Image: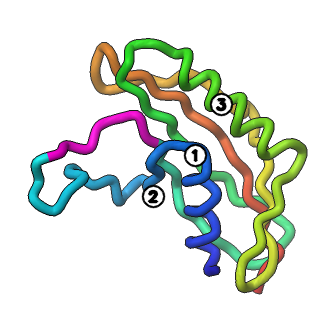
Amino acid sequence: MTKAECLHAFFAGFGLRAYEENSVPAWLDASQTVENAPPYLTYELATDEFRGEPVQIAVNLWDRSGSWQMLNELTDTISAEIGRCKRLVCDDGIICVTKGSPFAQNAPAEADNDRRKLLHIDLTFITN
């Protein structure tokens, strides 16, 4: 699995559709009859090679329910999954996922009922 595929698989593993932040489709089907709307997760895709310095990325959790409950619960789930360090194995080695600081914060969203939780994630690439 490439670094990009590995990161996508990790972020897609939390029960929401996951998209690289520049690749969120407007429609869920080819005939463009089902609009893509939250809840979903978007993440920055940044990769590196072994240099000892973490790469910092942002992950956004989106919901349109008007409530923070689902996003807060999902944040707790992601936090528990990462723990002190979540090791992801890819073709070139290991990606160590850790929580940035602050790990999570509420963030502005586009519409009144939209909710967005911003997560700060650090990736350390022990790879080629």
**Residue closer to the observer: 61 or 48:** 61
Give the image's coloring scheme. Answer: rainbow
- Residue at which label 2 appears: 20
Label 1 sits on a secondary structure element that is strand
- The answer to whether residue 79 is left or right of residue 60 is right
What's drawn in magenta, residue-wise?
34-40
* Alpha carbon separation for disc pair 1 and 3: 13 Å
Type of amino acid under label 3? Thr
Q: Residues within 10 Å of mark 3 (few under 14, many from 20)?
A: many
Identify the residue under disc 1: 58
| Spot occupied by residue 20 in the image (x, y as percentages of width and height) | 45, 58
| Label 1 crowd bin: few (<14), some (14–19), many (20+), radius 10 Å | some
Q: Earlier in the sequence, mark 2 or mark 3?
A: 2
Q: Amino acid at mark 1?
A: Ala
**What kind of residue is marked 2?**
Glu
Determine whether 84 is above or below 73 in the image: below
Assign a secondary structure to mark 2. strand
Image quarter of the C terminus = bottom right
State the separation of the CA atoms marked 2 and 3.
18 Å
Front residue of 29/121: it is 29
**Percent position of residue 21, x then y:** 42, 53
Q: Earlier in the sequence, mark 1 or mark 3?
A: 1
Q: Is residue 118 above or below residue 44?
A: above
